[in-house]
Image (cartoon, helix red, strand yellow):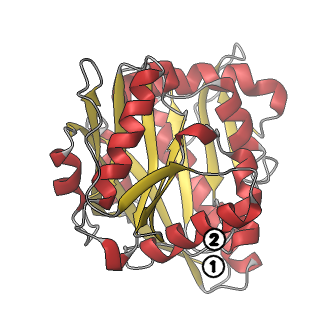
């Protein structure tokens, strides 16, 4: 399957951001029911570290120059797995997904060779309505490896934040304090090392990545138990357009798990979100996580909203 005659596949530029956004909004509305990207998200994707828009992205336009498909590779850490994204207008561009995926996989093979690796693991996500996309991925050699659940709760009539368990205190991150940022990173890095697929990132690189995050520093928290660091919660404003507070990561050190630390962090975040007038709180959870966080999340009122499946394949380096 190829690009239809008269249509054009070319490399995008930043001038194409509005056109790309139109495609992404159409794709998101089909997949999840609402637009989940904005212009800044598109621009960030095109200019992200370890992304070269002149080699790692394609834009497809019809004979009238109207954008109908967009693809991009990403690798937030520059190591480990590559992620492929293929967005198409569901009404006019459904036939584009398979050929665009093929182009991205060729580029992944090149990237593996450039990094001196025999192969690279590649992943992409599938939402419930995207049954054809799931079939095309299987035909291209992908397999489904896990499921993520998006969980949400209403913040209307949120009860007063209960007292934390004995010895547990929660405080805001001191974002202007380098030592506190290092502490936050250490908690996060240590807590996630026993979860599947975690790719460690040193503090210096993590610190650089903060500039690309949507930072709401008064919604980042550190938990202590008897004065010792025990957990951390990072919020994001990625769901503000849905009037929602969003928990990006929740980290609890192994020695302090099942002692109420995670619940205390979540309840503090919910209280802050509610005080700002947010309607809901939400987060995503990997069902393969051995720490079984779903039980914790349900205990603080979160419930399943939708699922996303992750598909994966190994791509040999070009020339191998």
User: Of all residues shown, which one is farthest toward the top?
Assistant: 64
Depicted 91 relative to depicted 301: above or below: above
Who's the residue at 56% across and 42% down the image?
Answer: 2
Q: Quadrant of residue 39?
A: top right
Q: Position of residue 250 (x, y in %)?
A: 41, 56
Q: Position of residue 148 (x, y in %)?
A: 30, 52
Image position of 119 (left or right of 273): right
Q: 58 or 307, which lies in front?
A: 307
Mark 1 touches mark 2? (CB < 8 Å): yes
Res 136 seen here:
no
Q: 29 or 9, which lies in front?
A: 29
Q: Position of residue 45 (x, y in %)?
A: 68, 43
Image position of 193 (left or right of 32): right
Mark 2 packing: few (<14 Cα in 10 Å), some, or many (20+)? many
Q: Position of residue 190 (x, y in %)?
A: 49, 77
Q: Secondary structure at mark 2?
A: helix
Q: CA distance from mark 1 to mark 2?
A: 4 Å
On the image, numbered disc 1 is attached to which residue?
A: 317
Q: Secondary structure at mark 1?
A: loop
Mark 1 packing: few (<14 Cα in 10 Å), some, or many (20+)? many
Q: 121 or 255, which lies in front?
A: 255
Q: Quadrant of residue 68?
A: top right
Depicted 182 relative to depicted 30: above or below: below
> Which quadrant is the C terminus positioned in?
bottom right
Who's the residue at 51% across and 67% down the image?
Answer: 188
On the image, numbered disc 2 is attached to which residue?
A: 109
Image position of 281 (left or right of 103): left
């Amino acid at each position: 399957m190829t690009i239809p005659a008269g249509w054009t596949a070319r490399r995008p530029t930043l001038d194409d951001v509005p056109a790309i956004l139109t495609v992404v909004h159409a794709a998101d509305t089909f997949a999840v029911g609402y637009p989940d990207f904005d212009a800044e998200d598109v621009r960030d994707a095109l200019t992200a570290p370890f992304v070269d828009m002149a080699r790692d992205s394609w834009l497809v336009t019809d004979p009238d120059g109207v954008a109908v498909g967009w693809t991009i590779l990403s690798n937030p850490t520059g190591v480990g797995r590559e992620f492929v994204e293929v967005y198409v207008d569901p009404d006019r561009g459904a036939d584009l997904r398979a050929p665009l995926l093929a182009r991205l996989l060729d580029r992944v093979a090149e990237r593996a060779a450039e990094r001196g690796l025999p192969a690279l693991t590649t992943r992409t996500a599938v939402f419930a309505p995207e049954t054809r996309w799931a079939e095309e991925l299987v035909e291209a050699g992908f397999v489904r490896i896990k499921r993520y659940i998006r969980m949400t709760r209403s913040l209307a009539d949120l009860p007063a934040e209960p007292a934390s368990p004995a010895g547990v205190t929660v405080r805001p991150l001191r974002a202007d304090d380098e030592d506190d940022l290092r502490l936050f990173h250490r908690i996060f890095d240590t807590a996630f090392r026993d979860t599947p697929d975690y790719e460690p990132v040193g503090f210096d690189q993590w610190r650089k990545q903060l500039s690309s995050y949507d930072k709401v520093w008064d919604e980042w928290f550190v938990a202590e138990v008897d004065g010792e660091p025990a957990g951390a919660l990072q919020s994001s404003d990625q769901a503000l357009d849905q009037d929602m507070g969003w928990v990006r990561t929740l980290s609890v050190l192994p020695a302090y798990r099942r002692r109420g630390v995670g619940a205390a962090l979540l309840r503090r975040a919910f209280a802050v979100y509610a005080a700002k007038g947010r309607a809901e709180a939400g987060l995503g959870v990997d069902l393969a996580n051995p720490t079984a966080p779903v039980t914790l999340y349900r205990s603080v009122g979160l419930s399943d909203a939708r699922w996303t499946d992750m598909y994966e394949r190994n791509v040999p380096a070009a020339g191998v």
